[in-house]
Image: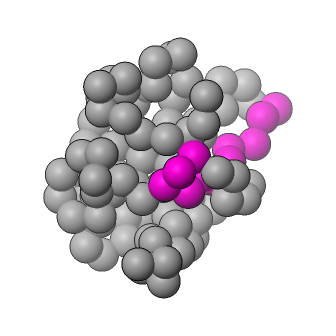
């Protein structure tokens, strides 16, 4: 399964804006249908399928690296800094519109 957000198959544990959230966007953290934890990025204030623009996997083990994924679930790179990666996903979505 790709790292795509589908509200019918995901559980959101928290949604809002924090210091790492790009302007005009919101983030949510939760699990997909398989229990994998993700940080999802949305354009605007609502976590809807249409507003989804990318995600970051949250590793279950300290030895794993988080990875970023685009809106279709395709790999968009490894993550060393969440704020930078969220900004890159937001910018990438803006340039692809």
Residue at coordinates 48% horizontally, 83% vertically from top-left? 95
Left or right: 53, with 58 as reference point: left
Residue ranking furthest to the top = 34
Indicate whether 26 appears above or below 1.
below
Quadrant of the snapshot with the N terminus: top right
Number of numbered discs visible in the structure rendering? 0
| Extreme residue in the bottom direction | 95
Q: Nearer the viewer, residue 53 or 26?
A: 53
| Relative to 84, residue 63 above or below | above
Is residue 83 something that shows in the picture? no
- Indicate left or right for 83 with 47 as reference: right
Tell which of 84 and 34 is nearer to you. 34
Q: Nearer the viewer, residue 76 or 67?
A: 76
- Seen at 60% across and 36% down, the residue is 2
Residue appearing at x 55%, y 24% in the figure: 36
Percent coordinates x, y for residue 87 in the rendering: 49, 72
Q: Which residues are magenta?
A: 63-73
Was residue 34 drawn as part of the magenta stretch in this picture?
no
Rendered image coloring scheme: one colour
* Residue 1 visible in image: yes
Which secondary structure class fits the magenta region best? loop
Q: Residue furthest right?
A: 63
Q: Is residue 95 above or below residue 5?
A: below
Q: Position of residue 47 (x, y in %)?
A: 24, 46
Work out whether 69 lies above or below 13. Answer: below
Find residue 13 and report its horizontal and vertical position in percent: 30, 28
Image quadrant for the C terminus?
A: bottom left
Residue located 53% across and 51% down the image: 72
What x and y, as percent, mark residue 89? 52, 67
In the picture, measured across the screen, residue 90 lies left or right of residue 51, that is right
């Amino acid at each position: 399964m790709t790292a795509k957000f589908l509200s019918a198959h995901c559980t959101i544990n928290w949604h809002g804006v924090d210091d790492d959230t790009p302007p005009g966007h919101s983030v949510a953290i939760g699990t997909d249908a398989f229990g994998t934890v993700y940080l999802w990025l949305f354009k605007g204030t609502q976590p809807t399928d249409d507003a989804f623009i990318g995600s970051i996997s949250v590793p279950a083990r300290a030895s794993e690296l988080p990875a970023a994924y685009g809106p279709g679930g395709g790999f968009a790179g490894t993550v060393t800094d969440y704020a930078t990666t969220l900004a890159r996903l937001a910018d990438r979505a803006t340039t692809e519109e």
